[in-house]
Image (spheres, grey):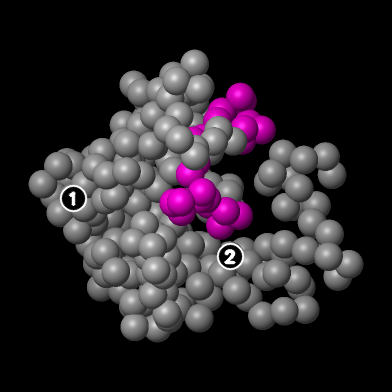
Amino acid sequence: MSESLLLPGERVDDLQLMGLRVIQSPEAFRFGMDAVLLSDFARVRPRSRVCDLGTGTGILPLLLYGRERSITCDAVEIQPDAAERAQRTMRLNGLESVISVQTGDLRKVRDFLPPAAYDLVVCNPPYSPSAASLPSPKAALRTARQESECTLGDIADAAAWLLRDRARLVLMLPAPRLADAFDTLRSRLLEPKRLRLVHAQASRPARLALIEAMRRVHPGLAVEPPLIVKTPGGCDTEEIRRIYHLPV
């Protein structure tokens, strides 16, 4: 069955989680460690209604479903080819009725998704402002990596529309963008409540930041212990192996 769902050049990757698989293309953006860390950081509760903004391959809904099978998810992707590939991934896993992938622009989310209807919004956004880095020559990679199609403010606006009061937005950003991120979130009544910094090694500065914000709650930020990816010898840490479901 998987072969019939593949286009030329595509492949199926096993997620090593409940038999779940994802279709990927070498010509398009492929998920990496950041998506896996973000899915682990997100607190997903039974029967949650989830929205993934900029789903790409559909990896975040799959990983969240792997942790909590009672969720439902609407996944939004602006690139038609990527959205269609993610839809085939859901068919491959038999999850069409659980994870709905829609082609759409998150900046226009009010046109196609209901307000105050979601318990959790997740987003692994483009990391670089368009003017801050060299543009990727491929449009698909440029959209995934740089703020050519949406900004952090656009994401916050969409989340503020989608989330119920006291519901949560979870996202990952480069650590140097934390101050701007907090300002942007608070201006949309999304209060930063949890923060975890990601370090390549314990001796190096934080590279990424995992952020949870809640809609319309009182201030108060919990800073969690840092997440260290590699030991001084260059091996995966025990926590990384746990996150990837590897023997520790």
The outermost residue toward the left is 111
- Residue 107 location in percent, x, y? 19, 58
Give the side of residue 6 with respect to residue 205, left or right: left
Q: Is residue 113 visible?
A: yes
Give the side of residue 126 with respect to residue 203, left or right: left
Tag 2 residue: 196
Residue 46, placed above or below residue 150: above
Residue 29, placed above or below residue 146: above
Classed neighbour count for the residue bearing mark 2: other residues with Cα under 10 Å, few (<14), some (14–19), many (≥20): many
For the residue labelled by badge 1, is the local secondary structure a helix, a strand or a loop? helix
Q: Which-is-in-front pick, marks 1 and 2?
A: 1
Q: What residue range appears in magenta?
A: 14-35
Give the side of residue 20 with respect to residue 75, left or right: right
For badge 1, the amino acid type reads Val
Give the residue drawn at x 57%, y 53%.
32
Tag 1 residue: 109
